[in-house]
Each structure stands twice: as structure tokens, then as C-alpha cells.
Amino acid sequence: MEVRDGISFDHLDRMTDSTGLIQHAIYGIPRRESGYTTDDNARALRLCARLWNHHPDDRMLSRIVCYLSFLEHARCPVKGFHNFLSYQRDWLDASGTGDCQGQAVLALAEVLGSRLPEGCRSVAWELIKTALPALAELRSLRAQAYVIMAWSHLWKADVRQASALESVAHQAALRLTDAYARSHRPEWPWFESRMTYANAVLPHSLFVAAERWPDEPFLAVAETSFAFLELETTSEGVFWPIGNLDWYSRGEARSPYDQQPVEASTMAEAALAAFAVRDDGGHLVTFLRAHSWFGGHNSLGLPLADPVSGACCDGLQPLGLNRNQGAESTLAYLWTEWHSIATRQTSALLAAAATQAVGSGYRVTPPA
């Protein structure tokens, strides 16, 4: 068993072959027929690059090379990146989805802004340059949010290539605020007419945009929308994300299940972004609430994550766990766990926030 910085990579390695990270699992066994996605390989690349930068070693570098090679292979002749690759190594899409472009660039920015070997950073920059025309045309709100986050990472790392993404990121932030203005109602301060998946990346991206452009309305929209999301996904101290059975449309009942790990992960990371801007300990409470969802502080009182293997179940269903342990779920857990470890090491406020966030007992009711 390999454990680095308190994180086990057993299941991630089990799901990875010489091509890349396999998309789905049946229980803890890779489901080969599901093939691979650029989304998942990008998430794995981002995690491993972050961990290598913190603690370099050859095994982590070999993972990075595998996932980075997958993204290089995913380069689409038309523009951007393919997303779906069969187990037989045939691309199943003519061009990738919008979200795939954003996820790929976010991971490549992590590599470019790191201390990884020059060859890795050079490949990352070449792929970002190739994708730039596609990034300017993105219409998916989440994909645009990922691009803002990618640019912000490069800007904060003082990487000179950040300037190539700056105008794209600024326009993306403006489009997000425009979407918010169109969808906003007094009882619904949100970017769309319904909440779906990875909701927290939208306010997250505006928190980081506000650091660069404080005179724009980015911070006000980020704070209002994030507060609304937190209200709608909290019940008696428990994080209760929007379920994907029927999502949550404005004016209708929300779907309490199936709850997916990506919601807890994106909520936790957005809370840290909000804390970085506002230095409000309440955001650490939000982070800890989302993090503890993986360990069983959730609506069913059931842990989803296995710290020994580093695997994570695919979600909470009305009657229990979805016991499959796919790539997206596992990476959501590992990424959130890394943030928990890193934040504990750097923030004295976290212990106090933990006391406030996680009380005793699991008596919960669905959000109204």
C-alpha cells in the first residue's frame, strides 16, 4: 500500500493502466468497457501535479506522465480536446464537451505552474496554446469557470504565460455575471434556472476573479450565490447536496438523491476560495462540513470513502450507498482529503471551525 502525505493511491493505481485512468468501476474493480475520459484523466493529473509539487518523487512523476500523455493524445484536430476514449483506444466523439475543455486546461495550468521537469511544463503549455481558440468560444458556464480557475492558478504562481489566458478569463467572468443577472430572482440568486452538478465551481470562479478585478461585480455575485448554495445544501449542520435524480429547478422541489461526491468536493474547494478572499472562519466551517460528508456526516450517516485504499463510493442513494468506486468519485475524495491535510497544516483556525462544524449525532431532515 502506498500512502503519501496521508493519502492512499491504491485504488487510483488500480483504476489506471498504460493508457490512462479508466472511467467506471464495478465495486472496486475497473470496468474496462466504460473506457476513459479526458475529464477524469485531467482531474488525476491536477491532483498528482499538486502532490508532486508538495513532495516530489519518481512514482508520482510516473502517474503525471501517464495522465499528461493521455491529454496530449486527446488533442482534437478540429479544436480543443476529445473526451471519450473506448477501451479499444478509439475516440467516440468528434470533439469534446465544453466542460472537458475547462477541466483539461485547469489540470494543464497546475502542471505549468509547478516545479515539474521542463518537459512536462512545455507539453502543458503547448496543449494550452492549442486549446486557446476553443476556450474563447466556450458557452458552458462550468467550463468557463474552470478556465477562470486555471488562469488564476497561473497568475498567482507568477507564470508569465498567464497573460495569454487573462482576457479569456476576464470575458468568462463577465459572462458568468451576465448569466447571474438574467437568472436572478429575489428568491433565486443563482446563475441558471436550476441547480445541477458541480454547482459550487460557479461562485468559486468569481471569488478568484474578484482578487484580480476588485472593481468588477464579481465578489458581490460570488458571495450572494455561494451563500444561497450553502443555504440550499445544509440541513442541521449536515451537507446535503442537490441530488442528480431530478436536480433542483427554480420553484420546484429539490432532488434529495442521488448525492454525488463531486458536489462535496467542489463545495469544499469553493469554501477555501471564499476564505482566501474574505478570511471568514465561517467558510472553514463550510469546508469541513463538505469534507466530513465523505466520512459519514451526511443524510444517511454512511461513510463513502475508504482511507485505506483511497477509494470512494459513487454516491448516496435513498436506501444506501452506490458501492461502485469510479474515477470521478475517487478523485473527488482524494482532492478534498488533500485540501483537508494542507489546510490543517497552515490554518490555526481550522480546529475551532471543526468544533463548530461537526457536532455529535446525525439527526437530519432534508432541506426545506
Image (cartoon, grey):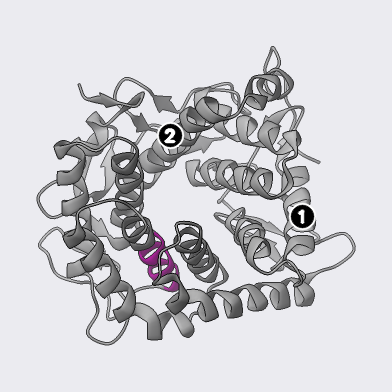
**Which quadrant holds the N terminus?**
top left
Q: Residue at x 85, y 67 (%)?
A: 185
User: What's drawn in magenta, residue-wise?
Assistant: 98-106
Q: Nearer the viewer, residue 285 or 333?
A: 285
Q: Quadrant of residue 48?
A: top left
Q: Compute the Cα span from label 2 to label 1.
A: 25 Å
**Which quadrant holds the C terminus?**
top right
List the residue tagged with mark 2: 338
Q: Quadrant of residue 324?
A: top left
Residue 102 belongs to magenta span: yes
Residue most toward the right? 186
How many residues crowd around disc 2 within 10 Å: few (fewer than 14), some, or many (20 or more)? Answer: some
Report x, y in % for residue 170. Answer: 59, 76
Q: Quadrant of residue 299?
A: top right
Left or right of 176, for residue 8: left
Q: Height in image: 150 above or below 268?
A: below
- Mark 2: which amino acid? Trp
Which numbered circle lies on residue 132? none
List the residue tagged with mark 1: 223
- Mark 1: which amino acid? Glu
